[in-house]
Amino acid sequence: MSTAPWTEANVPDLMGKRAVVTGATSGLGRETARALASKGAEVVLAVRDTDRGEKVAAELRSAQPVAEVTVRKLDLASLASIQAFADELLGEVERLDILANNAGVMVPPLGYTEDGFELQMGTNHFGTYALTGRLMGLLSKTPGARITVTSSVAHRRGNPDLTDLDWGSRRYNAWRAYGDSKIANLLFAFELNRRLGGTGPTVCASHPGWTRTDLQRHSGMANLLNPIVAMPVEKGVLAPLRAATDPDARSADFFGPDGRGEMRGYPVRVEPVERAKDPELARRLWEISAERTGVAF
């Protein structure tokens, strides 16, 4: 007997829930915010460009007049911005039901965050780690809270050199660095689940397969093939959305498309590469992350 595919219609009623969505001005983040708001959640758009964020918020309210959407400044490439965002939020709210760690960068030229981290590892992993840590107290006291991390099929190529995460002694390869940051997302999610030990928030991960977003703007080939191969963002968002909202999701679940190579399709539970489940690698990365970000939890 076949099972009906999981779609946005499966998202439960979210009235009374509050969600933070990072990178919500475009692509998967914007679609995640739209879907959560449409189900009644109060959504915080955590974005680098607040002008763009306000435009998105206005569009969401126009489409859904009852939508509760606010905009807050957050740059994951800045530990100071992460702390300022968290301090402001913690001072104003008493619950956080969903933290959707969506924001990221993909294969840019070699660059560094303001704290000196290689841009992809710094934004995609260290920023996600630090933000989650800063908000963990709020999440932990919210019954049924959910933390999600967005990875990529590129995690399969990831093999981070923990002695050279900033590519100081190697020739920079943007795709390898991207894969390293995306497997780091999974190592973090699975290690956080281990450390929570079955208590506190549910931690889920996902990847969107090949979805058409502006994230690929630095990759000529991916950008060229987008119109032919990629899923529309409305379908690509389903795996992250399932990770954030499926009542039956279990901590450490990993969702991705059900099609060939997990590139397209409807979201199902999928398996990461074995390296992503390595507890010793995850432990060492966690310790480095705590030391480099100054966030221990």
Image (cartoon, rainbow, N blue to C red):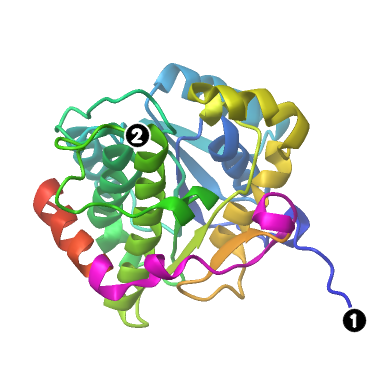
Query: Which of the 4 quarters of the picture holds residue 247?
Result: bottom right
Which residue is located at x 32 percent, y 61 percent? 188
Q: Does residue 278 appear to the left or right of 272 in the view shown?
A: left
Q: Which residue type does callout 1 highlight?
A: Met
Image vertical order of residue 218 relative to residue 64, above or below: above
Location of residue 49 in the rendering, given as x and y in whole percent from the top left corner: 40, 21
Circle 2 — which element? loop
> Element under label 1?
loop
Q: Nearer the viewer, residue 62 or 288?
A: 288
Q: Which residue is drawn at 58% across and 39% down?
A: 28
| Most foreground residue, 110 or 123 | 110
Residue 260 magenta-drawn?
yes
The x, y position of residue 99, in whole percent, is 42, 53
The quadrant of the picture occupied by the N terminus is bottom right
Residue segment shown in magenta: 259-281
Query: In the rendered view, does 259 fall on the left or right side of 15?
Result: right
Closest to the observer: 200 or 270?
270
**Residue 124 to residue 97: above or below:** above
Question: Picture coordinates of residue 263 (x, y %)?
Answer: 67, 50
Q: In which quadrant of the rendered view does residue 222 lie?
A: top right
- Identify the residue at image location x=33%, y=55%: 159
Instruction: Residue at 68%, 33% (x, y): give it.
Output: 65
Q: Name the residue under label 1.
A: 1
> Relative to 188, does residue 182 appear above or below in the rendering?
above
Give the CA separation, mark 2 to mark 1: 46 Å
Q: Is residue 242 above or below residue 82?
A: below
> Does the segment drawn in magenta span residue 48?
no
Question: In the rendered image, which quarter contains the C terminus?
Answer: bottom left
* Residue 173 image label: 2
